[in-house]
């Protein structure tokens, strides 16, 4: 016990902040957390969860189109955007309540308001109006996440960010998505699946930088086959009110001389750590070039009692990673078990259409790191589609170190790829070899069996 009000004060009640708070309290620490927006953070409210719900909604169009191949005939389906958003909002409210209950049951005190550091051990919480609280803590954890970053181009006020996309009053007839990361690619698929015309604009030669190049190329082919207009190697210079008719109310001017008319512009060109006005400068906390809090392998900043996890550190910005970092931090601080974070072989998925998932090294990374590798791949039409007109093809890849036979990476583009790769992530993390994969009996007929039958 210390003379401070709390052993740990957490700023930010997202996935990482809540997990750190609960685990620390479970180890006997006196813990409080402050949140100024919504419990559960980006993931629960304007990220992973509502995104996946919208992805699920957008895939129904494929199911209806393919139904006749299996003998079903259905009347022309009708989609109601308003009903989808209302149902999504109700589910998010339910999850907010669950997060509140988790904190309460763990004995974590919740402050609802904007928290700022006055010094390395003192936090002031502004709950609005004249309501302010000032508390002290032995250890401080920053887990405030990140926020969409909008470029300062002429007309950017006409654009929306990914947060706002979840609350659109209506589905646009034509939407331009600017950006080639997870968010841009996923929303392009969502809008296209729900019936919008979609143009995706990305400054580089191919989207989803960091993923296996062959997988990215194949995804681009499949998205184009779904009618999505992909514009690579160009950027938006300005946005203006369009003289077009109907839903095309905005005109985008591109740096290649072309223009795009649309009804909505979604910018998904990146996010920045949400560190403004936290009082970090006055405490001497070191920040990186993008404003990220610089931390060591234990998530400690240069100020010994100030720590940071999740997107605010800009290490590996995924919800499960933030949760892992939170658990390591709680063990380090309150269980007497110094635990460094482990960012190796982290499985991830892009809920594009079709979805892709991966764990371990890409082919390009493996060649650079190990030199001699073997690449096993299979490209096939899933069994479910053989009775339909859908010509979509699945791609699976294994990257293997030639000298040891160890599987360095597993990649898949196609239906159920996130579910399949999650299972393979255990094998890759354990250091399984190609012989181990080959020794596993296939489950037939499945797409997953391709991973244990590759030759």
Image (cartoon, grey):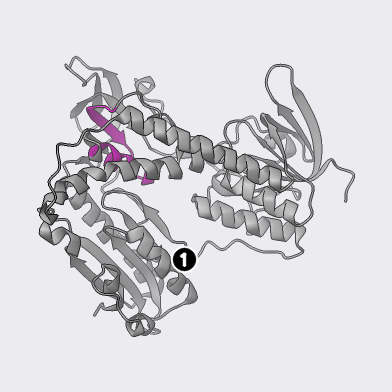
Across and down, in percent, residue 63 comes to 21, 48
| Residue 413 x %, y % | 28, 59
**Residue at image point 45% right, 41% down:** 47
Image height of 166 relative to 182, above or below:
above
Residue 142 falls left or right of residue 313: right
Q: Quadrant of the C terminus?
A: bottom left
Residue furthest toward the right?
Answer: 3
Magenta residues (range): 171-192
Q: Position of residue 118 (x, y in %)?
A: 76, 32
The mark total stands at 1
Element on which disc 1 rests: loop
| Residue 68 or residue 341, whichever sits in front | 68
Is residue 254 found left or right of 22 in the rendered image?
A: left
Q: Nearer the viewer, residue 177 or 356?
A: 356
Q: What's the residue at 26%, 67% (across, down)?
A: 447
For label 1, the crowd category at 10 Å Cα-Cα, with few meaning under 14, some 14 to 19 and many 20 or more, is some
**Is residue 439 a member of the stretch shown in magenta?**
no
Is residue 188 left or right of 166 when viewed as pictured? Answer: left
Q: Any magenta on residue 187?
A: yes
Which of the 4 image quadrants contains residue 263? top left
Q: Is residue 329 visible?
A: yes
Above or below for 364 versus 245? below
* Residue, disc 1: 345
Q: Residue at x 22, y 50 (%)?
A: 220
Looking at the image, can residue 301 be seen?
A: no
- Place of residue 177 in the rendered image (x, y in percent of width and height, measured from the top left): 30, 35
């Amino acid at each position: 016990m210390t003379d401070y009000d709390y052993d740990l004060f957490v700023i930010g009640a997202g996935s990482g902040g809540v997990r750190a708070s609960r685990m620390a309290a479970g180890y006997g620490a006196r813990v409080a957390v402050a949140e100024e927006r919504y419990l559960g953070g980006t993931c629960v409210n304007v990220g992973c969860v509502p995104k996946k719900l919208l992805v699920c909604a957008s895939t129904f169009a494929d199911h209806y189109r393919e139904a006749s191949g299996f003998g079903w005939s259905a009347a022309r389906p009708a989609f109601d955007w308003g009903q989808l958003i209302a149902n999504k909002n109700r589910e998010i409210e339910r999850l907010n309540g669950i997060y509140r209950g988790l904190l309460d049951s763990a004995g974590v005190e919740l402050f609802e308001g904007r928290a700022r550091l006055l010094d390395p051990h003192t936090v002031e919480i502004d709950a609005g109006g004249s309501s302010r609280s000032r508390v002290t803590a032995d250890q401080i954890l920053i887990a405030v996440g990140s926020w969409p970053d909008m470029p300062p181009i002429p007309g950017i006020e006409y654009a929306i960010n990914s947060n706002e996309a979840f609350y659109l009053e209506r589905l646009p007839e034509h939407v331009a998505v600017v950006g080639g990361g997870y968010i841009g690619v996923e929303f392009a698929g969502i809008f296209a699946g729900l019936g919008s015309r979609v143009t995706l604009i990305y400054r580089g030669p191919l989207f989803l930088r960091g993923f296996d190049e062959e997988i990215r190329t194949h995804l681009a082919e499949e998205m184009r086959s779904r009618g999505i207009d992909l514009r690579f190697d160009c950027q938006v210079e300005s946005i203006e009110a369009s003289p077009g008719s109907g839903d095309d109310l905005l005109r985008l001017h591109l740096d290649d001389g072309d223009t795009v008319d649309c009804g909505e512009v979604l910018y998904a060109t990146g996010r920045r750590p949400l560190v403004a006005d936290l009082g970090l400068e006055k405490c001497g906390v070191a920040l990186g070039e993008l404003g990220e809090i610089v931390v060591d392998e234990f998530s400690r900043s240069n100020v010994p009692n100030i720590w940071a996890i999740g997107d605010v550190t800009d290490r590996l910005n995924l919800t499960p990673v933030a949760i892992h970092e939170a658990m390591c931090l709680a063990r380090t601080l309150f269980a007497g078990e110094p635990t460094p974070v482990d960012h190796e072989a982290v499985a991830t998925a892009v809920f594009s259409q079709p979805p892709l998932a991966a764990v371990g090294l890409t082919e390009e990374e493996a060649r650079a790191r190990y030199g001699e590798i073997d690449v096993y791949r299979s490209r096939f039409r899933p069994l479910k589609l053989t009775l339909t007109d859908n010509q979509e093809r699945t791609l699976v890849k294994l990257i293997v170190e030639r000298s040891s036979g160890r599987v360095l990476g597993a990649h898949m583009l196609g239906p159920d790829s996130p579910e399949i790769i999650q299972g393979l992530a255990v094998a890759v993390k354990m250091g399984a070899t190609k012989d181990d994969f080959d020794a596993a009996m296939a489950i037939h007929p499945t797409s997953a069996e391709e991973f244990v039958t590759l030759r």
